[in-house]
Amino acid sequence: METQFQQEPKVSFFQTTTAKMMMVGILTIILIIPLALVQELIVERSQRQKEVITETTSKWGNSVYFYGPILKVPYKDPISGASNYAYFFPEELNNKTEVTMEKPLERSIYKSNVFSTKMQFNGKYTTPNFVSKGIPAENIYWNRAKIMIRTTNLKSLKDEVKIKLGNQNLTFESVASNTNDSIESLETNYFDYRTIQDNSKFDFTIAFNGSKQIKIVPIGKTTAAKMTSNWGSPNFNGNFSPITRDIKTDSFEATWKVLYFNRPFAQQYYDALPELGKYSFAVDFITPVDEYQQNERASKYGFLVIGLTFLIFFLIQSISKINIHIFQYSMIGIALIMFYTLLISITEHSSFSFAYLISGVSVIVLISLYSISILKDRKFPMFIAMSLSVLYTFIYVIIQLEDYALLVGSIGLFLILAAVMYFSRKIEWNK
């Protein structure tokens, strides 16, 4: 009796699980190219928004920078005989700033946050001391003293600026700047300091239209400041942090107190006035995370979404023995890329949350319906729809989180890995 041995038909390499895994992996890498193009589109639209906002706010008013009031007294150098100026900062400087966010300026689809601010200042000077400079009394021109303010936003002043100094009322006027920077100056007319030296208290109000930021240099020997606003997302920066802050959903209140030994500059200067902007305290009035930033953060998870979605289909294919063509993987991948183009286009005309919901639902429904024709069963498409819903929800939560984004993301990825290991434990990978 002859024993006949039946040989199993040879399976082509391209029909093996290894080959299919390689093709799906290569396709995943290829899809990085359109995903990168979408990310470039987001950056381009974001840059366009910044350009429009800069152009729009420049007409209303830019950032508000305040450095003053400074007592300016001319004198004659006893050695060279040249005329120079001495600059003296206040002994005490108190500030109360009220910031009102106005209706955003709109141009096309872009909106610019702008504000109006009323800044009240009061304080006092001490009698200037020229002894350390060795300048005799007869070389000091007390009758040609001035008060000056340095700022960057003269064109957006809402009213003329007047100061009450002792028993005198003085009006500020703009003066030409000798520097090429953006800082401009306001100065009063001449007055005789000797007439107010026994009562050197001052009081004035200045009002601006502005945008983005308010920055104040604490030049008082003791500087106390308070700022209130109907803006609920302030960003405190600069060289000094507020000593108190009360931030609510639609408003904030903050106070600062800076003493002369807290800052690395003196109370008086001769010949030249230094620029002290880097020693200021500041508040930013900008949207913390705008729609384009959220779109950019969402797109960074695109590779993860594509990889996990392909992994789900591949596991289903391996478990159910249903053959899924590489072309069908390609269609699914393009649908996942379309999520981000839908997201950015809808966001520009609505909110990010609404756009994310519409884009997510659209892509999940599209892929689920397409998978019905691929998998010939409603059980697997329902599982795919549920998995994509969980994945998109997970990413949305991470985008909204700031302090706990890394923690939640790490835990989520660990659970996803655990699920993949569980469902793939019985697959025979050698076939």
Image: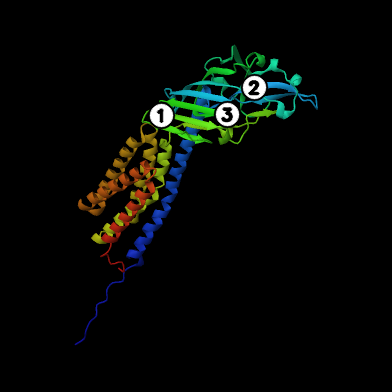
Mark 3 and mark 1 lie on one chain; the one further toward the N terminus is 3
Q: CA distance from mark 3 to mark 2?
A: 14 Å
- Disc nearest the viewer among 3 and 2: 2
Q: Dot 3: few (<14), some (14–19), or many (≥20) neighbours within 10 Å?
A: many
Choose top left, top right, bottom left or bottom right for residue 325. bottom left
Find the residue positioned furthest to the left. 1
- Disc nearest the viewer among 3 and 1: 3
Q: Are marks 3 and 2 in contact (CB under 8 Å)?
A: no
Q: Disc 1 residue type?
A: Phe
Q: CA distance from mark 3 to mark 1?
A: 27 Å
Look at 45% across and 47% down and name the residue there: 36
Look at 32% across and 35% down and name the residue there: 354
Numbered circle sitting on residue 410: none
Mark 2 and mark 1 lie on one chain; the one further toward the N terminus is 2
Q: Nearer the viewer, residue 46 or 411?
A: 411
Choose top left, top right, bottom left or bottom right for residue 68. top right
Q: Are marks 2 and 1 in contact (CB under 8 Å)?
A: no
Percent x, y for residue 150? 60, 25
Q: CA distance from mark 2 to mark 1?
A: 38 Å
Residue 324 seen: no
Percent x, y for residue 28? 39, 54
Q: What element does badge 1 sit on? A: strand
Choose top left, top right, bottom left or bottom right for residue 86. top right
Find the residue positioned furthest to the right. 80
Q: Nearer the viewer, residue 130 or 271?
A: 130
Q: Which residue is mark 1?
A: 252
Percent x, y for residue 422? 27, 60
Q: Are marks 3 and 1 in contact (CB under 8 Å)?
A: no
Q: Which residue is mark 3?
A: 221
Numbered circle sitting on residue 127: 2
